[in-house]
Amino acid sequence: MNVYELSYFADDPRFSGFEFPEDAPSLISRESITRDFDPELHGKLDWKPVSLAKVWVPQPVVGGVQPYNDYPRVGMLPAFSRRAVEALRVELEANGEILPIQSKVGEYFVYNVLTKSLALDVDKSEITFGPPNSSKETAFMVDRFEFDETRLAEHAIFRIREYPQVVLVTEEFKRKADQAQLNGLNFVLVSPIPAGQNWEDRETARWRARRKSVEPLRGQCLTIVLPTAKRKATEAEKVAARRVLHSLESVLADHIKSMDHGFIGSVDETSERKSELLLYVTCPDVEVLIEKLRPWIVEIDWPKPVRLEKLHGNRFDVHAEWEPVE
């Protein structure tokens, strides 16, 4: 039986994700709402998934997700569109909790995986555990997954006891997702893998093959420069910059008509340099991007004049030259 890691296309800028707002409070008296999804006895082999259904209220999320994306994630948590939930409802309801979130781009749900599987064959798998006296009992890495298929019979989407940081699915889950033609789900085969091969190396090879098709989507770059009052940005300025970022993500998403039409760019990274906060937007054509963003740029709520810098090339090219935008 094939088993896959349920992942996403991190290399494709058309598939952005959601985030919970940084100040979103915990519902169960933890550090943050993201931590609510952590199991009890985190790091121990006896970890226990935490049910949230009884305390859950729909949570707002931010991020430049496009409506065609059926698996946007919330941070690194699984999240599904309404379309995906309808296609996979039997499997999802049997193995976890489908929790509604508040999104401006459509009906989405964060998913709390509750199935803890004992199906991994520890003796046949290649697993890196910590030293015997380590407080962390779960694995640091699994280079090779081997499963007891008799224990997979009732699974569809699950976490394994020894390596709970990955979400795994079975062939039937993948078959239903493929049949429904869902977008954004990246199924990474982890088992069975031919002898002498590593599942991560195989995925790296797949990524390199995909990269050629998505490179033109991020071939150029626009930097939005937000000057700060002093050399180092204050927390208030960083909060204000995040508001600008979320507004920008919404504007970029609004231009997309479908997965293959209307993409003008995506926020690639944010950073800080002396007296400035920076938003990097990678794009296929920086001149088109600038013209599309001009109405939004003049409305940016920032106390100092905002500057733009453009690059007709990859921003990681050390020989490329940035130009100011008039």
Image (cartoon, rainbow, N blue to C red):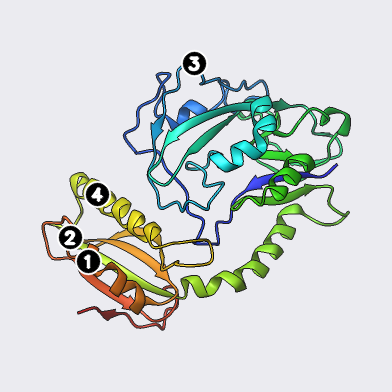
The residues tagged by marks 1 and 2 sit, at their Cα atoms, a distance apart of 7 Å
Q: Please name the amino acid that badge 1 sits on.
A: Pro
Query: At x 49% / y 67%, what residue is drawn?
Result: 261
Local crowd at mark 4 within 10 Å, few (<14), some, or many (≥20)? Answer: some
Camera-nearest residue between 164 and 130: 164
Query: At x 52% / y 53%, what residue is drawn?
Result: 68
Mark 4 or 1 closer to N-term?
Answer: 4
> Does any portion of residue 191 appear in the rendered image?
yes
Q: Name the residue under label 3.
A: 54
- Which of the 4 image quarters holds residue 302? bottom left
Local crowd at mark 1 within 10 Å, few (<14), some, or many (≥20)? Answer: few
Q: Are marks 1 and 3 in contact (CB under 8 Å)?
A: no
The residues tagged by marks 2 and 4 sit, at their Cα atoms, a distance apart of 18 Å
Q: Name the residue under label 1.
A: 295
Q: Name the residue under label 4.
A: 238
Residue 194 relative to residue 255: left or right: right
Q: Mark 2 points at which residue?
A: 299
Q: Please name the amino acid that badge 3 sits on.
A: Lys
